[in-house]
Amino acid sequence: MSEDIEKKLETIPKAIFFDEKEDRFFILDQTKLPVEEVIEEQKDLNQVYDSIYMLKVRGAPAIGIAGAYGLLISLKEHIDRPLDEFIKIVEQNAEYLNSSRPTAVNLSWALNKLSKIAKNFPKSSSSKELYKAIRDEAIAIHKSDIKTCREIGENGAELIKEGFGVLTLCNAGALATGGIGTALAPMYVAWSKGVRFKAYSSETRPLLQGARITCWELNKFGVDTTMIADSVSSYLMKLGKVDMIVVGADRVANNGDTANKIGTLSLAVNAKHYGIPFYIACPYSTIDVDTKTGDGIVVEERGAQELIYIKGQQIAPKDIKVFNPAFDVTDNSLISGFITEKGIIRAPYDFSKSAKSE
Amino acid sequence: MSEDIEKKLETIPKAIFFDEKEDRFFILDQTKLPVEEVIEEQKDLNQVYDSIYMLKVRGAPAIGIAGAYGLLISLKEHIDRPLDEFIKIVEQNAEYLNSSRPTAVNLSWALNKLSKIAKNFPKSSSSKELYKAIRDEAIAIHKSDIKTCREIGENGAELIKEGFGVLTLCNAGALATGGIGTALAPMYVAWSKGVRFKAYSSETRPLLQGARITCWELNKFGVDTTMIADSVSSYLMKLGKVDMIVVGADRVANNGDTANKIGTLSLAVNAKHYGIPFYIACPYSTIDVDTKTGDGIVVEERGAQELIYIKGQQIAPKDIKVFNPAFDVTDNSLISGFITEKGIIRAPYDFSKSAKSE
């Protein structure tokens, strides 16, 4: 890829910034988007805990990276302590940070990785050396995510042709990862290569991640983006304006059934009706070969208040019953393929076999 | 029907009230729902104009009736004038009120009807007699709408069985009419007869009529109602919770293609995928035999602000492009039947023929 394209991709908005010269850690406060763009330095453990808890940083890969850098900067002030004390602090701080969002797999995965380094560190070493080892691993976690996103982007970009309409839901973008996103990565790579298409971002009720975050980051990068209410997608397809749908995934079962943001299933059903390709973009790590089918995926139901109030404004009777699932499960038969860092995987899906053959 | 059921149906919330003893006209201010329930007496022409313009009263049938009563109460103070002066005032006031929502067909239809009575009134009569004639016609328009709604309700109620899940979109309820609604009428009649089912109200972005109005009126009447985000409907169907979908219509073409609130098409496509009956409930007057197919229906596109702001709160970048169609057009092949005051009409649809045969 040319230097120009690399430079262009460098300008995609970022959720997480780490200054390697001074070991300083910054995040973009996503709760303030799209009204304000506030970059906030994270200076201590409690602040990082709050930033993750309050969704200032969100998206599974981004949270994992934020946890790693958060742990790192919390250790700076303890670097002169004896190693055994320092190791205890690493473990305590990791445990504390992990409780900020207990169900986020990437967070505990990253923090466990760093804790383990501390636990197994040679007792003859210094705290400074352990700090450096943790620092190297935090940066490695971040770089690995950047690489995965980029590979998803390169693989998926080939599907996007000049003049296409590409529809997405929620935010599986740069702001959900350390890199250029998952579902949005193919759009960024294609756009950077000069392919001109129209992106459509479905607003994604109730929490409006499509409106607030996806529209913001695509718009910021200069991708030609149009927002729609979630209910518009079928009509948009009928009008012939959608050539491809690409969304992220929260968990993929071994047979390809996919849990993702509520509304994904409706898009997939409509895509099948209109004969439009429907893709899931995700890192290979999202595929859970131990879950045989979508029936094994438990869908989180969230509270009524999330739907009854929008930014503090009441929009429905206070005592109305609400059904507010955070995700739905899309049948493998509705999915044209999975865009991963290892390439595009097409039906029939049996990920345990493909995993073994590698 | 038993007296108990009649009494129960009498308690369905109303958009419009006319006190026949004192000729006083009241509306429920729907802009304040669901936070406040304010009944507002309409005392003069400008107030009625504003109430229609500001959507305090909305829904095509309700606006027509409000226009008729609005014209009537504006005439009270002129009742002692000579007939020729009085007739001029009728015509002027009707013209003025009609400009409050120029595209609402029912409004101009009702006002033209009353204007015509004035124009053709015997010159030997008194203003008082003309006032009475207009009054009788306004009440007749209201009563006719009540009757139509009730017949739609009786015809549609037969489709709703004990234990059903019935999904609707937007508000084609009592508050959109002078009576018990169109899409909600079958639910009200079935519930009053003791049939227990679950109603699901899709919130209906961007203007949230499902959340604000349908949830309010169904809840108020005591129908077991659950609100969902628009994106949840497909998953709800997949879970087996929906046995029937019923929505209203803004315009039905001769072949059955139907324009209705944006989101209707997506519901119909999903209903077909899951094998769920999908009905349109509407008065026969909504069927436009002169429009051959849905291709002849122009869909209104509304402004970006409606989507970018919710109750004054910014939820997306200010400069994002928006595609905001108010309606979509559902193909006749996706529609199981039309619930009208003349019965349930099923495919193949050719309304010009059925109209002729009557």
Image (cartoon, coloured by chain):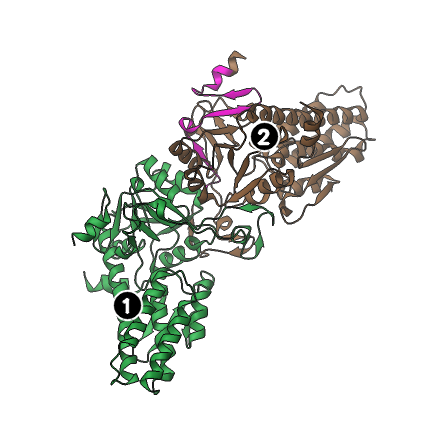
Chain colours: A brown, B green
Q: Which residue is mark 2?
A: A195
The chain carrying label 2 is: A
In the rendered image, the quadrant that contains the N terminus of chain B is bottom left
Residue A347: say if magenta: yes
Magenta region, residue range: A325-354
**Label 2: few (<14), some or many (≥20) within 10 Å?**
some
Residue B330, quarter of the rendered image: top left
Report the disc number at residue B92. none
In the displayed structure image, the side of residue A307 where residue A91 appears, left or right: right
Q: Which one is in front in this view, the residue at disc 2 or the one at disc 1?
A: 2
- Residue B193 visible somewhere in the drawing: no
Q: Amino acid at mark 1?
A: Ile
Residue B257, quarter of the rendered image: top left
* Element at label 1: helix
In the displayed structure image, the side of residue B317 where residue B306 appears, left or right: left
The chain carrying label 1 is: B
Looking at the picture, how far across and down is residue B14, in whole percent? 35, 65
Q: Which residue is mark 1?
A: B141
In the displayed structure image, the side of residue B190 where residue B250 appears, left or right: right
